[in-house]
Amino acid sequence: MPSNSTSNSTDASDFDSDLRYDYIAKVILLGPSGCGKSCIMHRFVKGEWKVSSSQTIGVEFASKIVRVGSGSNLTRIKLQLWDTAGQERFRALTRSYYRGAAGVVLVYDTVNRSTFRQLAEFIQDVRSLTSPQVTMVACGNKADLIEEADRTWIVPPAEVRTFSQSNPDITVTTCSAKSGKGIEDLFDKVAAQLLTKIELGEIDPEDMNSGVQYGDVPRWDRSTKKSRKKDSKKGFSALSRFFANRAGEEEIKKDQQDKEESGGRSSSRKNSNTPLLRRPSTVEQEPIELDGRGADSRVDVAQQTKSGCCY
């Protein structure tokens, strides 16, 4: 019994770590009706073949975490998958889900040439309704039926090559939702391209309209990274910059106090060589303690500071 309890706790810990992710991205599945978009999503998320599948009404939703890289370079991206209906009567509804998408999977039927030619309509909508940095991957489903299908219906490789040349920003691949071949590779390509654009600065997770946001793993934001790079080139860290700014503020306050006490005369501190990083003097704030001779028994902090002594 104790061994089983330990095993269960370990499994729960591993399960919790698997739920953590660095980024979350919105990905939509588009394509004509009957191409197998729902089956592809079900195979990817559940890892099994969806035997009975009905036509999608509107939009269906699922999510899964994809790992890109390994070791210290491992990055987890949670893909939010939106499976849209391919029928024309739902097109007006599904277009509203295009906005804010970081990735698009264009699905066509490899044994139905007409579905491949209909991709042009979906691509036109994507380019007009999404960000210019959107990642698009075209995937030919039902690759397991090519060997036994009618050759007149199969999408010819020459037509696929022409499509790739006309759309260099779209990666083309094939898969089979029934056998599972190429499904993992399809979404790995989407995640890898999204991560590349994030690292190159083409996609900003801080932008709510980019379709990508930071996950639950802490990361430096882009502005902090830029400031740290500039500081390293100048030879000082962000921490020293913070203290320098604070010391500068204290210096300005002290100058204003000296002007008020001297009746508006300029302070001699302006031309002094007082070190920038020092604690402000507390002479005016601490109570004066007199010794037996009636003299101030405190250490002259201001004089120490002028002589270059920091404490």
Image: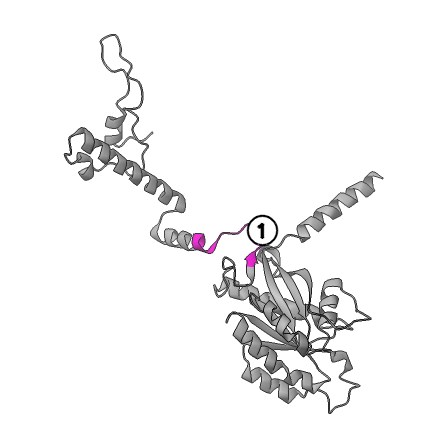
Q: Which amino acid does the dot numbered 1 rest on?
A: Val
Is 70 placed above or below 93 here?
above
The answer to whether residue 155 is left or right of residue 198 is right
- The residue positioned 50% from the left and 57% from the top of the image is 206
The image shows residue 271 at horizontal and vertical percentages of 18, 39
The answer to whether residue 52 is left or right of residue 247 is right
Q: Residues within 10 Å of mark 1 (few under 14, many from 20)?
A: few
The residue lying toward the viewer, choosing from 95 and 281, is 95
The image shows residue 241 at horizontal and vertical percentages of 36, 45
- The residue positioned 26% from the left and 12% from the top of the image is 290
Is 8 placed above or below 279 here?
below
The picture quadrant where one finds residue 141 is bottom right
The image shows residue 143 at horizontal and vertical percentages of 73, 79
Asked if one can make out residue 307 in the rendered structure from this viewpoint, the answer is: no
The answer to whether residue 201 is left or right of residue 162 is left
The picture quadrant where one finds residue 79 is bottom right
| Residue beneath disc 1 | 217
The answer to whether residue 113 is left or right of residue 98 is right
Looking at the rendered image, the quarter that the C terminus falls into is top left
Magenta run includes residue 271: no
Magenta run includes residue 217: yes
The stretch of residues the image draws in magenta is 213-225
